[in-house]
Image (cartoon, helix red, strand yellow):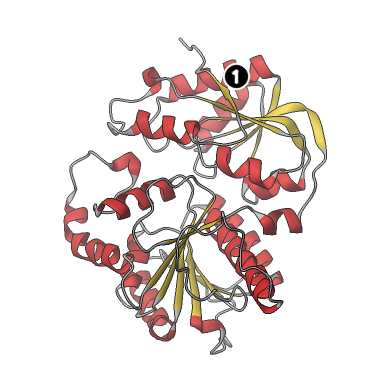
Amino acid sequence: MSPRAGSAGTTPHSSRTLAFVESPVQLLNVLEWAHAHALEADWTASGAELVPAQTRRTADPGPPPAGAGLTLVVLSPTDPMTRGQLRRMSELARDEGHEVRWEEARGGTTAPFHTIGGLTPLLRRADRVVMGDPFSRYVQLLLTITKARDLVVVDDGTATMEFVAQLARGERLVRWHRKGGRPGPRDLLFAPVSSSARRRLTPREGRRVEIFSSMPIDETPDGVTVTANDFGWTRARFGPPRITGSADMVGTSLVETGVVDGERYLAAVRTLARAHGATRYFAHRRERAEKLHRLAAETGLEVVRPDLPLELIARRGPIGRTILSFPSTVVHTLPLALAGTEVKVAVCDIDPTWLTEHASPRAQGFLSGVTGTARDVHRLAAVSVV
């Protein structure tokens, strides 16, 4: 596929809704958003009730956005694992009738200038912008260009919980695992753009902001529409899966982000796998190859590098009767994607002694919150490791 594959032939209708994604999970959740609002439009046309009462939590949700005919812009990262999953997800998006525009947004020093220059005409015409990562500097920069009056934030995992809380409190936008640290030179240089993005994502007259999420949201910013993501597209498109008698384990990138000590993590995986009879380890796309080679050698687990987000892998099957996970997005999303099956999701808490000295002061509280707010999961106590 060429870097700009799918970019030709943009129609006026499709260019009115632009979606920017940088990860496979973000792209999946754009498809879920489009599916949910396409169903909503069908219900409206038939004269049925707009949406279930628990789905929207604002008094005035505004006009229902059209789910079909959007233009998906992939701001491609550089790591091969993520790029591969994004290619596969792009194929699924095209199958759903959406246009996909692949941008080599990080392909060299001049790439950002070419990308932003090429997208500017579309941004200025767009009525609606959908984004998967409001913390992304790329996305924040693009928000300064568009005059779209309808902004939508779809899930980027547990970061969505932090984004909503920061927006509600009027705080600067910063990822949870970096919060508490001193801003670096690049942070200070980019601060005006970040502040502008936060203002753009604050609703006011003539500007509608929607958050489409499967995560628990306690602090809803004034005027923001919150729509529940129940993974209806995933369940309609895949499965139900064949369920095996063993357990599977889900990997995490907490070591790579400097939150959890690598030796403690390896020992915890080994202990959990032995206690629950796990046979496979589904690697996070950011986990380093050296770590995974050692993990496979020392635990006997079969390391699987998924070619799609885990929600789709699990729904397609085969999948273990029990899925073991540390605190992460999947403890919220897998029970929804696997609703109606007999698969049990079990989550193991992170022991405070596993945290590195570089971990954010908020790390333990945030990770405990991720586990504590998860629904339909079985909680496991943190395992003892030496």
Residue 76 lies left or right of residue 164; in this view the side is right
> Along the line of sight, which residue is nearer the eye, 351 or 57?
57
Q: Is residue 33 above or below residue 147?
A: above
Q: Which residue is drawn at the image coordinates 51% and 78% (left, top)?
A: 17
Q: Which residue is drawn at the image coordinates 38% and 70% (left, top)?
A: 111
Label 1 Cα crowd, 10 Å radius (few <14 / some 14-19 / many 20+): many
Q: Report whether residue 86 is seen.
A: no
> Along the line of sight, which residue is nearer the eye, 223 or 18?
223
Residue 357 lies left or right of residue 245; in this view the side is left
Q: Which residue is drawn at the image coordinates 80% and 47% (left, top)?
A: 240
Residue 178 lies left or right of residue 339; in this view the side is left
Q: Which residue is drawn at the image coordinates 56% and 50% (left, top)?
A: 81
Percent position of residue 122, x then y:
44, 83
- The N terminus, quarter of image: bottom right
- Amino acid on which the number 1 mark rests in the picture: Leu
Percent position of residue 104, x then y:
46, 68
Secondary structure, mark 1, is: helix
Residue receiving disc 1 = 272
Count of marks overlaid on the render: 1
Q: Report whether residue 345 is seen.
A: yes
Q: Quadrant of residue 176?
A: top left
Percent position of residue 376, x then y:
62, 35
Percent position of residue 296, x then y:
62, 26
- The C terminus, quarter of image: top left
Q: Quadrant of residue 143?
A: bottom left
Q: Is residue 262 above or below residue 109?
A: above
> Along the line of sight, which residue is nearer the eye, 87 or 63?
63
> Along the line of sight, which residue is nearer the eye, 62 or 335?
62
